[in-house]
Amino acid sequence: MSRFTLPRDIYYGPNALEALKTLKGKKAVMVLGGGSMKRFGFVDKAVAYLKEAGIETKLFENVEPDPSVETVMKGAAMMREFEPDWIISMGGGSPIDAAKAMWAFYEYPETTFEDLITPFNFPELRQKAKFCAIPSTSGTATEVTAFSVITDYAKGIKYPLADFNITPDVAIVDPALAETMPPHLVAYTGMDALTHAIEAYVSTLHTVFTDPLAIEAIHIVEKDLIKSFKGDMTCREEMHYGQCLAGMAFSNALLGIVHSMAHKTGAAFSTGHITHGL
């Protein structure tokens, strides 16, 4: 028997961020990266939409690229104090990955990374909170995947966390957020998306469900990445959707040697972020 898992709801298209108005709850922690989403006004919009839904929001900011064990533990501690029923993360792959791990430690404070690194061995989540992911880059697709990567810089170890439990409940894929990317980030994340799609397509676990998603993602990258890099915002929007399709594919077909190597090299050269797919 095989399994195909996606978020319950994927909202996409211009103004998709307004879907936050539909969430049901009382409190949310919003996990953010280095500040770009705040500078461009998306955080204020999100907080306003959540307020309209009757949800009080607290921010956890400044998650670093390749998020650390320490950052995860700080976020989980803040969540235990605030007791949110929604965890919302907006930004690139790093804050969303960090938020997924925070979610596990919020719900199960006694657990350890050593407990969680056994693939598909997470405890049942959603005992305290649900999860909403809002990507601002077009590559990692962590908004639709069952994966998170956290780094222990003291030990030089990357912890790849894998479990369908950490697939977000809601993904909001709004192209307006991706329009803020500088060209070099468009290129780097686009190569990440292409790598995800190719690895999913050639995976030994590929299926009739994952192949169409991987193939379409490859077509979109081939058609739109260079134009997106040059500033074509229609192609930027298409890339934002294409990377999401690649994520749906690889979350269910899994990845291969490129990401196996990336985890090792990323840990070995942990003083700097290494671009996937290059």
Image: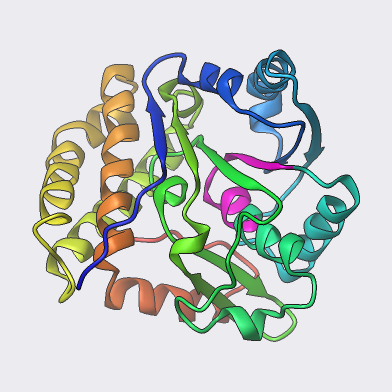
> For the point 25% across and 36% down, which residue is it?
225
Rendered view: 212 above or below 147: above
> For the point 15% across and 76% down, which residue is it?
204
Q: Quadrant of the N terminus?
A: bottom left
Residue 102 rendering spot, x and y as whole percentages: 70, 59
Instruction: Give the camera-side residue of 65 and 99.
Output: 99
- Report if residue 274 lies within the magenta region: no
Q: Quadrant of the C terminus?
A: bottom left
Q: Which residues are magenta?
A: 85-98
Rendered view: 75 above or below 111: above
Q: How many marks?
A: 0
Is there any visible trace of residue 230 in the rendered image?
no
> For the point 46% across and 46% down, which residue is it?
143
Rendered view: 69 above or below 39: below
Residue 111 rendering spot, x and y as whole percentages: 72, 78
Rendered view: 257 above or below 215: below
Q: Is residue 172 left or right of residue 130?
A: left
Q: Is residue 271 left or right of residue 148?
A: right
Residue 270 rendering spot, x and y as whole percentages: 61, 73
Residue 216 rendering spot, x and y as whole percentages: 13, 42
Is there any visible trace of residue 87 in the rendered image?
yes
Color encoding of the figure: rainbow
Q: Is residue 105 left or right of residue 23?
A: right
> For the point 41% across and 45% down, which residue is it?
7
Instruction: Give the camera-side residue of 253 and 137.
Output: 253
- Report if residue 96 lies within the magenta region: yes
